[in-house]
């Protein structure tokens, strides 16, 4: 499967990419192993950090772990600090990484879970709810698994 993101050089980061949208359960080492993301050690006023930059659908997302944090296990997903849609940007970042919200240990205070209902229609026209999800990335991951099979069904998502 092709990656839904492109890794960029840290020097290509857009201004304002500094707000922690979510904290992922995965360490930079796990992200490297699972997704092939390369982290670099950077230094700023907060101290040394592992950092990486990805882009998907015209948006940039940072990944950062402060090495001197009290618990440096978790990786922050960075979104643009001037965003008007924290929830949308966090879900876009998770979707780009192929990570669902169950892999997040904390969200930004302005994150507002949304309700997405995934429906399926079978060959006889009957419609069923497959599941309800709180982030578009969760729906995208389920759809990716369901549509990988030979027998195709019709699926759609309703936002409630």
Image (cartoon, rainbow, N blue to C red):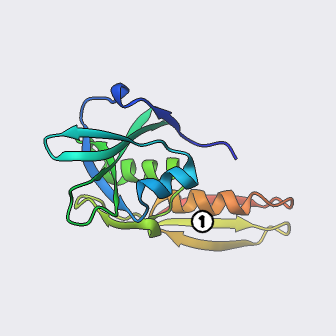
Question: Nearest the camera: 79 or 143?
Answer: 79
Q: Label 1's element?
A: strand
To which residue does mark 1 refer? 118
Q: Quadrant of residue 25?
A: bottom left
Q: How many marks?
A: 1
Q: Residue at x 43, y 61 (%)?
A: 26
Q: Quadrant of residue 40?
A: top left
Please state, as top left, top right, bottom left or bottom right, where the C terminus lies in the image. bottom left
Q: Residues within 10 Å of mark 1 (few under 14, many from 20)?
A: many
**x and y, in percent, of residue 14 in the image:** 31, 29
Check the image and name the residue furthest to the left: 45
Query: Is residue 80 found left or right of 159 in the rendered image?
Result: left
Does residue 6 appear in the picture of this structure?
yes
Relative height, residue 28 to residue 132 (above, below): above
**x and y, in percent, of residue 152 in the image:** 82, 58
Q: Residue at x 64, y 72 (%)?
A: 130
Does residue 57 appear in the picture of this structure?
no
Question: Nearest the camera: 53 or 14?
Answer: 53
Check the image and name the residue furthest to the top: 12
Query: Is residue 44 found left or right of 88 in the rendered image?
Result: left
Q: Residue at x 39, y 41 (%)?
A: 52
Query: Is residue 107 found left or right of 33 in the rendered image?
Result: left
Q: Quadrant of residue 71?
A: bottom left
**x and y, in percent, of residue 16 in the image:** 24, 35
**x and y, in percent, of residue 94 in the image:** 46, 53
Relative height, residue 74 to residue 40 (above, below): below
Q: Residue at x 64, y 58 (%)?
A: 156
């Amino acid at each position: 499967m092709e990656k839904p993101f492109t890794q960029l050089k840290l020097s290509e980061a857009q201004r304002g990419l500094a707000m922690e949208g979510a904290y992922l359960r995965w360490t930079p080492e796990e992200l490297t192993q699972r997704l092939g993301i390369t982290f670099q050690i950077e230094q700023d006023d907060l101290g040394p950090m592992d950092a990486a930059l990805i882009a998907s659908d015209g948006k940039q997302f940072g990944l950062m772990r402060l090495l001197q944090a009290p618990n440096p296990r978790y990786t922050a997903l960075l979104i643009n600090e001037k965003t008007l849609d924290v929830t949308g940007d966090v879900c876009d970042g998770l979707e780009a990484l192929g990570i669902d919200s169950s892999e997040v240990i904390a969200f930004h205070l302005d994150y507002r879970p949304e309700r997405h209902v995934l429906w399926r229609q079978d060959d006889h026209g009957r419609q069923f709810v497959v599941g309800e999800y709180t982030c578009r990335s969760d729906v995208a991951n389920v759809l990716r698994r369901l549509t990988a099979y030979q027998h195709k069904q019709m699926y759609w998502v309703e936002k409630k």
